[in-house]
Amino acid sequence: MFYDSAKIYVRGGDGGNGCVAFRREKYVPEGGPWGGDGGRGGDVIFRGDEGLRTLVDFRYRRHYKADRGQHGRGKNMHGRSADDLVIRVPPGTIIRDEETGQLLADITTDGQDVVVAGGGRGGRGNSRFASAHNKAPTMAEKGEPGRERWVLLELKLLADVGLVGFPNAGKSTLIAQVSAAKPKIADYPFTTLVPNLGVVSMGEGQSFVIADIPGLIEGAHTGAGLGHDFLRHVERTRVLIHVLDTAGTEGRDPLEDFRVINQELKLYNQALAGRPQVIAANKIDLPDSNEHLKRLQNEFGSAYEIFPISAVAGTGVKELIGRIHQLLQELPENTAIEEEPEIVHRVVPRFNIRREDGELVVSGREIEKHVAMTNLDNEEAVDRLQRIMQVMGLEQALRHQGAKNGDMIRIGEFAFEFVD
């Protein structure tokens, strides 16, 4: 089975905790703090791997978490940073944030790396907090939690040429004729249920990749038939070959088929309307093909190149492929439709406050990070957290939201009692 979409959970490794330690050696009185920092947590990295063709591996495993950093130790020994977790995906994979829909990465080349969930930094040991006013701090930071998110993976095949057309037009037969691909071929609609890739050799050191896109039907842009499942693969191609059943073997009109498929491509993505396209007038060895071929040439001959072919017998196929190869050499290497990320200029608040089930819930990456990295069992660390909250303006904001003595304040996984 071909899998070209998946939803998975990723989380960067937590940072290691800082250490509280003091130098206690003979002849070294009042040695001072000596606790080392924690190591950084591992990142979750997506890497392009040209040896992969589908996203099937993500059907069996959906959760990926990098290792946490090593905790700091005494004698100012810092913890070791964790190794990154590398997830391999086929080139052509688009990665989006599941919650916001934001485009995070577009993996297009072998070996391309993208960090999708960063690891947390290690917490600082108590030697980092020594000052003229506090020469023996008894506090250290906990490691920063790693970034976590659900991501959507979507695979768009990277092919130079895409075959489009109604079911049973002869696309699978054509790709089998010009490459070593062995698609399923039979005399009924939707024989091809997954995209097929084939490499067309044009001589030593010259080749291109051709994709057999499963049959489209009217309404495909709305998801009808195989619709959205496979229209996405057309976006990456540089040239389209529109395969038409010129003999009208199923009572269809090839001119109407041509108009319908092009309209579906246009409605799905306006930029596809300008993609270079040639017509492969297939099945010319069957009765009634000459009449339809003349109609095609009269109607579209001035706007499109038309190649009469028989994919079964191989008639005219060499001329068609030769012209496609010439077009590819004239076109830029990459004409894929790239999605421009939306740039929104706005001030992001440092935190938000809302009422929920009788509690005041404070959310925000910065404040949640400070709370998560604080050892709440350490009085000195709690005092420092309170000073951070005052500098951020959190106490004043809570009062503005109507917080009173005894109210419960929740930040992340921790709850506090508000004392004015």
Image (cartoon, rainbow, N blue to C red):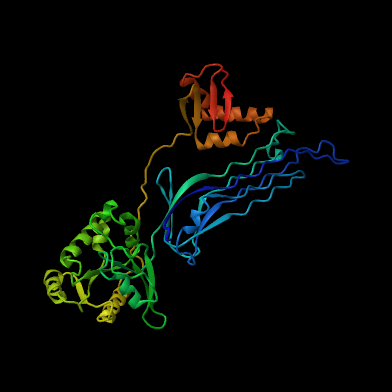
Q: Is residue 231 above or below residue 62?
A: below
Picture residue at 73% right of the left edge, 41% below the top: 35
Picture residue at 41% right of the left edge, 37% below the top: 347
Q: Quadrant of the C terminus?
A: top right
Quadrant in which residue 370 is drawn: top right
Q: Position of residue 219 (x, y in %)?
A: 24, 54
Q: Position of residue 110 (x, y in %)?
A: 48, 65
The residue lying toward the viewer, choosing from 345 and 267, is 267
Q: Position of residue 63 (x, y in %)?
A: 54, 49
Quadrant in which residue 253 is drawn: bottom left
Horizontal side of 189 relative to 257 (left or right) equals right
Toward the right, the furthest residue is: 26
Toward the top, the furthest residue is: 405
Toward the bottom, the furthest residue is: 204
Q: Is residue 261 above or below residue 202?
A: above
Horizontal side of 171 relative to 374 (left or right) equals left
